Amino acid sequence: MSAIRSDRMNEEVKKTVTGIIREMKDPRISPMTTLTAVEVTNDLKYAKLRVSVYDEDESVRHGTVDALNHAAGFIARELGQRMLIRRVPALKFQLDDSIAYSVHIAKLINDLHAGEDRPGLATQGDGAGTEQDAKDRS
């Protein structure tokens, strides 16, 4: 399958499965669930779907992925009906921690910047100072 066709198939599967997940009424699936990436094999037999769950509780995140894997047959059937494709891939959901990791890194950077003084103001240890400091030293 060409790269363009593969990319279009991945995006179409992602869009359709996202709609199916939004319509599901399973209480185990967090409402803050997002599909971040979909990789469909060239022969359309398998699809890996990367799921990001925005929740602090690790058990909720893993529970959501387990519930999606449990409902993979239902989701695949709905996918086949909505996309009208000959072969529906077997779906495998995997937890994607990249968004949570990027939020963690952004928080660390913000904490570093919060500890610094405001830019433009000299600190006592750098040898520079204001004019009043120079007068006081002489």
Image (spheres, rainbow, N blue to C red):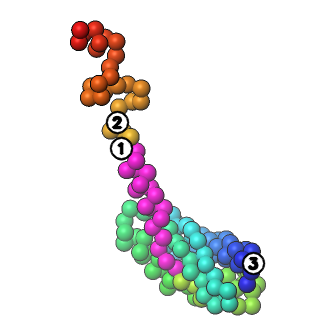
Say whether residue 55 is left or right of residue 133. right
The relative height of residue 138 versus residue 91 in the rendered view (above or below) is above
Please give the residue where the numbered disc 3 appears in the rendered image: 5
Please give the residue where the numbered disc 1 appears in the rendered image: 112
Res 133 quadrant in image? top left
Q: Amino acid at mark 1?
A: Leu
The residues colored magenta run 93-111
Between marks 2 and 1, how big is the CA–CA gap?
7 Å
Between marks 2 and 3, how big is the CA–CA gap?
50 Å
Image quarter in which the N terminus is found = bottom right
Between marks 1 and 3, how big is the CA–CA gap?
44 Å
Report the disc number at residue 116. Answer: 2
How far from the left and from the top, in percent, is residue 123? 31, 27
Image quarter in which the C terminus is found = top left
Say what secondary structure mark 1 lies in. Answer: helix
The relative height of residue 73 versus residue 120 in the rendered view (above or below) is below
How far from the left and from the top, in percent, is residue 135? 28, 8
The relative height of residue 2 versus residue 127 in the rendered view (above or below) is below
How far from the left and from the top, in percent, is residue 124? 27, 25
Q: In the depicted view, which residue is nearer to us: 37 or 14?
A: 37
